[in-house]
Amino acid sequence: MRIILVLLLIISCSPLKRFEETASKWENDIAKLERLDKSQDYSEDSILFIGSSSIRLWSSIKDDLNPYETIRRAYGGARYTDLIHFTKRLVSSHDIKAVGVFVANDITGGMNDLTPPEVLNLAKFVVKQIRSSHLDTPIFFIETTPTPKRWKAWPEISNANDLIMRYCNEKKGLFYISTRDYFIDKNGLPKEDLFIKDKLHLNRNGYSVWGGIIKNNLNRILALN
């Protein structure tokens, strides 16, 4: 009886249970991404990127990260609260060289924001799910970018970034790619000329900067593995 109660407690505390209502919203998007696996060819040297719209909209990724082969399996508006339901489906079927994660919508300055520790716990859960099928594959987290639109929330976003960075630094096979220094100007504010009109998503110059940072870090990360 005690064992059953413990199991029930574990299940009730699972983030999958806590955020179960977020799964159905993105089911069609995930199904479309799964269909791409059947129509797109890629090698085992490819790097799989999962996460939110900055990955989905990165149309210049092949040029920006050349010669690395890339696979994009991202959907607009992704949060950790819904990605946890789909990580296995997006990752487990791929034979790849590394996995990149970029999720930027759990703290936006809104009423339903998660706390930085909650973001960290969900990031850890994503790692656990990836490790269920890719035990030794390098995983790198790309820092949530400081943006003009969400600048008021930057202290909390930055805190969550720092927590994930420390977590990655403590774990073998996890890596953190910091980008903030390249997107904050000398005046202490985000560089607006790197974003499109919505002041949230990167423009071509922004992606060029972002891609350069990520590529340089990939050279370092993959040299260690």
Image (tube, helix red, strand yellow):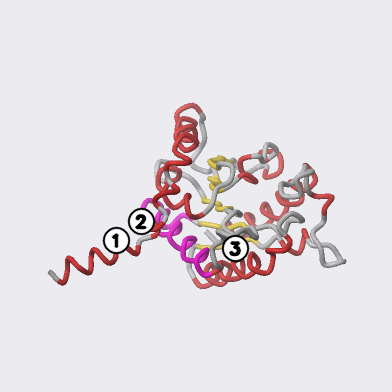
Span shown in magenta: 117-137
| Type of amino acid at the residue the image marks with label 3 | Tyr
Q: How far is mark 1 from mark 3, CA to CA?
A: 30 Å
Relative image position of residue 80 (x, y in whole percent): 50, 55
Q: Which residue is mark 3?
A: 176
Callout 1: SS: helix
Task: Say left or right for 22 vs 187.
Answer: left
Q: Earlier in the sequence, mark 2 or mark 1?
A: 1
Instruction: Residue under label 2, please give it.
Output: 17
In the foreground, 167 or 81? 81
Q: CA distance from mark 3 to mark 2?
A: 28 Å
Q: Nearer the viewer, residue 48 or 221?
A: 48
Q: Secondary structure at mark 2?
A: helix
**Label 2 crowd (10 A; few <14 / some 14-19 / many >=20):** few
For mark 1, does the 10 Å Cα neighbourhood hold few (<14), some (14 to 19), or many (20 or more) residues?
A: few
The nearer-to-camera label among 3 and 2 is 2
